[in-house]
């Protein structure tokens, strides 16, 4: 038998049920679990984005960043402009040889003055002198941007650490072309190997950057002695009585003017500068290969930095494609990032497929730069 309930009865029962439920304080249905409340009321951005924004805000309050470096004035000006346009911050860049800047830095810290944020130089001074003195901080807690941390973006498939303690990063990886010559005095194909320089005809006719002080001469001698050839080669070269100097521009000028037919370990940019002006100069990579280095494009963080957030900005920016492009343009050297263009570089400063390259910045080799100073004094009779 079917029981029929009048419509008015149903409405009455429903009203009673609702009133009873409200009186018990029944909670509303929970939000859809696929849409957490934080996604609509909070900040759902990745943590690195929030940290990056916070760092930029704090850095703007700090106002500037101070770097001690061995770069030239033209590089300084490009970096100042690029960093200012990107972040609105000033760069205070103090230029000097690494040895001079180390003396200055130690004097300041001895007086209780902490004015420097970053150290930008070649390898050797940072990992072998400043880090053991407790002056540097490692990078580990400074890197924020995924783009900077992407190992596939780097030349050797990993971040370009110089040392295992992560006290130095080489954001450039430029090949060095160590031999230069005057094309009016040296025939084509006459010098294609390091061993060609041992020919008696070149005795007393080679001008070389000083290997007994930190710089391109020391870097070259260290690479040759530890990886490309050996110390015995350096001793044979010493018997050729090369003329030693420290002013790269002057040494390049001597080759360009024909005072000396062959140059060794002279900064390539100086030789290229004379070549562009019409001088009969040429650079050649020896058949034994050469080394790749960050040159003065190696970064270290000075501890007790007065502008710690600006430090994070610069370090992360330098390791991105955008920052790497500006830094590569400024220095004129190839970036360690593989996605940075090279069309603005001189051919001599671009890594070539099939060429033998030795990464001279790795700590096991760069650590030999300091010992090489004394060895070079003995081999090349430097007073």
Image (spheres, rainbow, N blue to C red):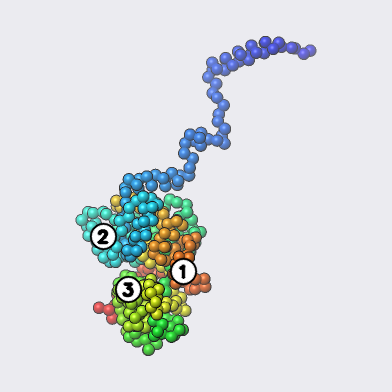
Residue 203, quarter of the rendered image? bottom left
Quarter occupied by the N terminus: top right
| Dot placed on the residue nearer the N-terminal end, 1 or 3 | 3
Q: Is residue 134 above or below residue 261?
A: above
Number of residues whose C-alpha sits closer than 10 Å to that of mark 1, classed few (under 14), some (14–19) or many (20 or more): some
Residue 225, how many percent across, how many down? 39, 76
Question: In the shown orientation, is residue 351 left or right of residue 84?
Answer: right
Question: In the shown orientation, is residue 214 left or right of residue 294?
Answer: left
Residue 358 visible, this angle:
no
Q: Which residue is mark 3?
A: 249
Q: Which residue is mark 1?
A: 350
Secondary structure at badge 3 equals helix
| Dot placed on the residue nearer the N-terminal end, 2 or 1 | 2
Question: In the shown orientation, is residue 135 left or right of residue 35?
Answer: left
Q: Which residue is mark 2?
A: 105
Q: Nearer the viewer, mark 1 or mark 3?
A: 3
Secondary structure at badge 2 equals helix
Specify the farthest residue to the left. 111
Q: Residue at x 30, y 72 (%)?
A: 213
Q: Is residue 224 above or below residue 50?
A: below
Q: Residue at x 45, y 47 (%)?
A: 48
| Dot placed on the residue nearer the N-terminal end, 3 or 2 | 2
Residue 285's disc number: none
Residue 98, how many percent across, how many down? 30, 65
């Amino acid at each position: 038998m079917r029981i029929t309930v009048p419509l008015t009865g149903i409405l009455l029962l429903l009203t009673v049920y609702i009133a009873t439920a409200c009186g018990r304080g029944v909670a509303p249905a929970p939000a859809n679990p696929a849409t957490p409340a934080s996604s609509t009321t909070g900040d759902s951005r990745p943590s690195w984005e929030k940290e990056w924004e916070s760092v930029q805000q704090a850095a703007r309050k700090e106002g500037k960043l101070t770097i001690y470096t061995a770069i030239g004035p033209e590089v300084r000006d490009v970096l100042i402009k690029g960093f200012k346009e990107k972040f609105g911050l000033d760069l205070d860049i103090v230029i000097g040889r690494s040895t001079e800047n180390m003396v200055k830095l130690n004097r300041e810290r001895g007086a209780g003055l902490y004015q420097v944020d970053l150290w930008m130089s070649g390898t050797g001074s940072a990992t072998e002198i400043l880090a053991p003195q407790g002056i540097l901080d490692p990078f580990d807690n400074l890197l924020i941007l995924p783009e900077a941390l992407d190992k596939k973006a780097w030349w050797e498939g990993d971040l370009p650490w110089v040392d295992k303690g992560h006290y130095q990063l080489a954001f450039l990886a430029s090949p060095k072309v160590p031999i230069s010559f005057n094309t009016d005095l040296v025939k084509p194909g006459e010098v294609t190997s390091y061993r060609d320089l041992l020919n008696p005809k070149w005795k007393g006719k080679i001008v070389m950057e000083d290997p007994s002080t930190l710089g391109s001469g020391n870097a070259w001698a260290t690479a040759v002695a530890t990886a490309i050839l050996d110390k015995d080669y350096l001793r044979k070269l010493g018997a050729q009585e090369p003329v030693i100097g420290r002013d790269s521009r002057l040494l390049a000028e001597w080759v360009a003017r024909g005072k000396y037919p062959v140059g060794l370990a002279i900064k390539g940019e100086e030789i290229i500068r004379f070549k562009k002006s019409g001088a009969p100069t040429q650079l050649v990579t020896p058949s034994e290969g050469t080394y790749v280095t960050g040159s003065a494009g190696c970064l270290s963080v000075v501890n007790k930095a007065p502008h710690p957030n600006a430090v994070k900005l610069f370090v992360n920016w330098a390791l991105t494609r955008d920052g790497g492009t500006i830094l590569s343009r400024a220095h004129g050297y190839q970036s360690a990032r593989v996605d940075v263009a090279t069309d603005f570089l001189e051919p001599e400063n671009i890594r070539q497929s099939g060429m033998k390259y030795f990464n001279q910045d790795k700590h096991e080799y760069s650590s030999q730069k300091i010992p090489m100073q004394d060895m070079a004094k003995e081999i090349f009779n430097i007073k």
